[in-house]
Amino acid sequence: MGYIGRFAPSPTGALHAGSLVAALASWLDARAHGGRWLVRIEDIDPPRCTPGAGDFILTQLAACALQPDAPPLWQSQRGALYSQALAQLQAASWAYPCACTRKDIEAAWAAQGLAHQRHIERPYPGTCRQGLHGRSARAWRFRTVEYEQKVAPALTRQAQAAPFFIAEKTLHWHDRRLGAQQQCLAQSVGDFVLQRADGLWAYQLAVVVDDAAQGVTHIVRGADLADNTPRQLLLQHALGAPHPQYLHSPLVLTADGEKLSKQHGAPALDLSDPLAALQQAAQALGLPAAAAAGMKLTDALAYWVAAWGNYLQSAA
Ligand code: GLU
C-alpha cells in the first residue's frame, strides 16, 4: 500500500509558528516518500472552535504552498461513521456507559488519595465499569484496562512485526523520531471517553475512525500528542483497523518552556512572508536554511524534501 499522510488541525484558531512545524513535517514526510498528503479539519468540538478558522487554516496552508492531494475532510460531517464505530465497540462490550459527572470523578479520586498534580493525568477511577447502579448514562467509555489484559498475551515483544506490545501492564510502541516509547495506560488514563456527556465525539475515537477511513499509513504530528498514541493503537486494534506508523515532531516552546499555543498567545502566521514562516518551521525541525533572497517557495520546499531523509537518519 502506498504512503498516505495527513495534517489534522483543530480549528481553535489560525495556524501559528508551532502548528506550521507539524504541518510542514507531515507534508515533507509524505513528499519524501512519494506519498499522498491529506488535510482533515478536526472541528468536532464546536465550543472550542473559532468560526472561520478551518477555512482560514486552509488559506494559510495554500499560502505556504502546502496543498493537499484531495479535498479536505471536516470531522463535523462524519458523525455517522463515529456512531458506527461506537456501535461496533458496544456490540463487542468494549464500550460501556458512564454516569459520572466531573464532581463524581473528583470525589472518587479524593477517596483514592489521588490529589491533583500539575501535568499528571489521573485515570478514570472505574466507577461505572461494572454497571450504572441505577444512575443514568451520560458518556461512553472504552474498556481500556480489560482490553489490554485480554490482548496482552497475543501482543508480545516476540512478535517482531508488532506495531505495539504489552508487557508488565505497559504498552510499548515505536516512534520514528523519538524511538522506543511506553505508557502504562491503566495508571495514566484508564477507561477513556469515546462519546462525551454532551453528545460530542471524543478526539480519540474520531481520529482513529478517520485515519482508518482515509487509509492513513503514516501519522506525523506534534510531540504533544505522543502520549495519545497508546489509546489510539488500542482503539485501532479493537476496531480491526490497520496501525499507521508514528512520528512526533518537535514542539516550538515559549520563553518559559510552555508549548506555543493559542492559549499562550501565539500570533497567527504572518502570511505576508510565507517563506520566512516556512524557514522558521524548517529550522525548528533541524533542517538547513534553504532560502536565498527571492527564492521561490516551491524551490525551498523541494530543497527541504531532499534534506528530510537526512534529518530522519540523524534523528534515528
Ligand atoms: N486535531 C489535533 C490537534 O490539532 C491533532 C490530531 C492528530 O494529528 O492526531 O491537536
Image (cartoon, rainbow, N blue to C red):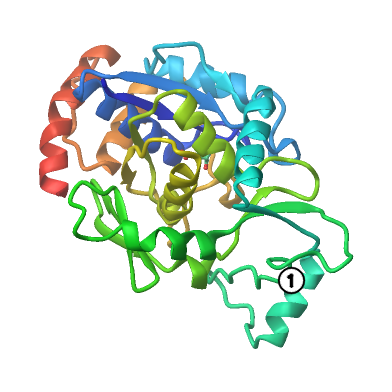
| Residue 282 lies in quadrant | top left
Name the one closer to the observer, 84 or 104: 84
Give the residue number, with chain letter if any, for mark 1: 105
Which residue corresponds to the image point at 60% horizontal and 61% vertical from the top-left? 191
- Occupied quadrant, residue 284: top left
On the picture, is 101 further left or further right than 125?
right
- For disc 1, the neighbor class at 10 Å (few under 14, some 14 to 19, many from 20) is some
The spot of residue 144 in percent (x, y) is 54, 60
Query: Does any portion of residue 256 appear in the rendered image?
Result: no
The amino acid type, in three-letter code, at marker 1 is: Ile
Q: Residue at x 88, y 64 (%)?
A: 135
User: Relative to residue 162, is residue 289 depicted above or below?
Assistant: above
* Residue 311 image offset from top left, x and y in percent: 15, 39
Question: What secondary structure is found at the residue carrying circle 1?
Answer: helix
Q: Describe residue 164's horizontal placement relative to residue 90 as left or right.
A: left
User: Would you place residue 315 above or below residue 54 in this image?
Assistant: below
Residue drawn at (50%, 40%), measured in percent from left and top?
239
Question: What residue is rendered at 26% in x and 22% in y?
Answer: 1
| Residue 259: percent from left, percent from top | 46, 54
